[in-house]
Image (cartoon, rainbow, N blue to C red):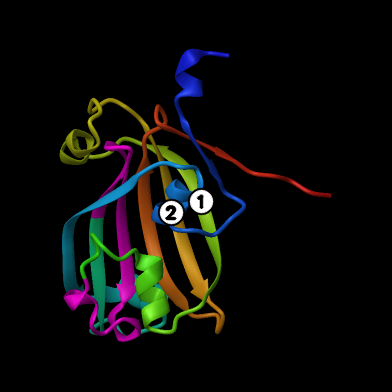
């Protein structure tokens, strides 16, 4: 087997887990660096996605995820503010987003995810430690709670040289 693939972090797409828990499950040290956490107006796109009014607020979080001190992904997460109204006071470098959901009584049920290839912006490529011409795996995920509400939209640029993903199919 090619040596570069042996060094990749293998992530299981069968399980709905956050980055921190996933890294702990495979005995890697997770670290998150928050680049921004902004309260903003939903606008038409996110209002439609979340079933809220365009003038309602959402939280927009941009963060870099590290495994054993190496940047592996850059995430942009959007959450309706009414679901987590005091999130601006929570240190997301300490608490995972899934832990925040638990604090607010949100029970994640399922998600729908797409995978594409994409070049990140020049600034995002620098943050990830890759060349601007390097393609990343772009995951876009809509997450639902047990009541069927959309609780999160996430765009995740993942380094293909650091991560691989597996899915188990059953008949």
Judge whether 10 appears above or below 169 on screen: above
Q: Is residue 32 above or below residue 69?
A: below
What is the secondary structure assignment of the residue under circle 2? strand
Badge 1: how crowded within 10 Å, few (<14), some, or many (20+)? few
Residue toward you, 97 or 135:
97
For image coordinates 38% across by 70% down, the residue present is 99
Furthest toward the front, the residue is: 27
Magenta segment includes 153? no
Task: Tell me whether circle 2 and circle 1 mark residues in contact (CB < 8 Å).
Answer: yes
Q: Which residue shows up at 23% across the image and 25% down it?
A: 131
Numbered disc 1: secondary structure: strand
Q: Is residue 24 above or below residue 164?
A: below
Mark 2, residues whose alpha carbon is within 10 Å: few (<14), some, or many (≥20)? some
Left or right: residue 92 compared with residue 14: left
Q: What residue range appears in magenta?
A: 63-90
Foreground residue, 140 or 44? Answer: 140
Q: Position of residue 150 (x, y in %)?
A: 46, 75
Horizontal and vertical percent position of residue 142: 47, 64
Residue most toward the right? 171
Identify residue for label 1.
114
Query: In the rendered structure, does residue 80 fall within the stretch colored magenta?
Result: yes
Cα gap from disc 2 to disc 1, whole angstroms: 5 Å
Q: Does 94 sit left or right of 105 as displayed?
A: left
Q: Is residue 164 rendered to the left or right of residue 54? A: right
In percent of width and height, residue 161 lies at 40, 27
Tell me the residue at 55%/84% (across/down): 147
Q: Where's the N terminus, which quadrant?
A: top right
Q: Earlier in the sequence, mark 2 or mark 1?
A: 1
Mark linked to residue 65: none
Q: Label for residue 140?
A: 2
- Residue 15 percent coordinates (x, y): 58, 55
Residue at the (38%, 59%) spot, across then down: 154
């Amino acid at each position: 087997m090619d040596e570069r693939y042996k060094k990749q972090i293998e992530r299981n797409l069968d399980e709905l887990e956050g980055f921190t828990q996933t890294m702990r499950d495979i005995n890697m040290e997770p670290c998150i660096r928050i680049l921004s956490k902004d309260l903003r107006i939903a606008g038409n796109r996110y209002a439609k996605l979340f079933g809220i009014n365009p003038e309602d607020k959402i939280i927009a979080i941009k963060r870099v995820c590290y495994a054993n001190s190496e940047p592996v992904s850059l995430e942009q997460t959007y959450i309706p503010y009414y679901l987590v109204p005091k999130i601006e006071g929570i240190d997301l470098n300490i608490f995972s987003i899934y832990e925040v959901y638990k604090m607010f009584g949100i029970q994640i049920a399922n998600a729908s995810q797409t995978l594409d290839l994409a070049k990140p912006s020049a600034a995002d490529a620098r943050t990830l430690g890759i060349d601007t011409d390097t393609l990343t795996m772009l995951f876009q995920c809509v997450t639902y709670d047990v009541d069927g509400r959309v609780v999160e939209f996430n765009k995740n640029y993942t380094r293909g040289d650091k991560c691989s993903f597996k899915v188990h199919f059953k008949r």
